[in-house]
Amino acid sequence: MASVTEIGSLIDRDPKIRGGRPKIAGTGLTVSRITAWYKMGMTPEEIALEYPHLTLAHVHAALAYYHVNRDEIEADLAQDEAAALEWQRQRGPKANRQ
């Protein structure tokens, strides 16, 4: 008989990892990162193939979490984008010419 995995066990939080953001259990890979790849056009299958430590179930669990908690994950994505823009601004115009 096949073992059963509770879907809720695939996503967790740890205040010591990624600021407590929801992530794939046992990894540091956040739901927001998987969501970003998905929003860039990667399919769940492509994400799982690109990151072999993930299963397709992990990817689908992350996307399900996103759809149920859209406001939280969109806020995480916006925060990441703002941090990237600030980092780029601090590096100055030389960084943009590379």
Image: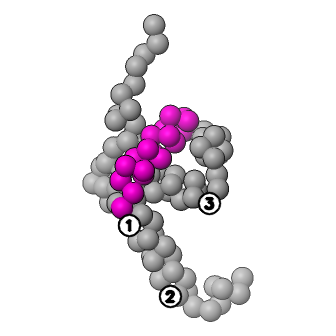
Q: Which residue is mark 2?
A: 90
The residue sitting at the bottom extreme is 93
- Secondary structure state at the residue bearing disc 1: helix
Tell me, yes or no, whether the highlighted magenta stretch contains residue 67.
Answer: yes
The amino acid type found where label 1 is placed reads Ala
What residue is at 55 percent from the left and 36 percent from the top? 56
Q: Position of residue 98 (x, y in %)?
A: 72, 82
Q: Specify how the rendered protein is coloured.
A: one colour
- Secondary structure state at the residue bearing disc 3: loop
Name the N-terminal-most of marks 2 and 3. 3
What residue is at 64 percent from the left and 56 percent from the top? 41
32 above or below 44? below
Q: Quadrant of the N terminus?
A: top left
Q: Is residue 97 left or right of residue 55?
A: right
Q: Badges 2 and 3: C-beta atoms under 8 Å apart?
A: no
Q: Position of residue 28 (x, y in %)?
A: 43, 50
Q: Which mark is residue 40?
A: 3
Q: Residues within 10 Å of mark 3 (few under 14, many from 20)?
A: few
Part of the protein shown in magenta: 53-71
Report how far apart the C-alphas of labels 3 and 1 lie in the structure.
17 Å
Disc nearest the viewer among 2 and 3:
3
Q: Is residue 79 left or right of residue 41?
A: left
Report how far apart the C-alphas of labels 1 and 2 lie in the structure.
22 Å
Residue 27 in view, yes or no: no
Disc nearest the viewer among 1 and 2:
1
Quarter of the image for residue 44 reads top right
Nearer to the camera, 80 or 60: 60
Nearer to the camera, 24 or 8: 8
Q: Position of residue 76 (x, y in %)?
A: 40, 64
Q: Which residue is mark 1?
A: 75
The residue sitting at the top extreme is 1
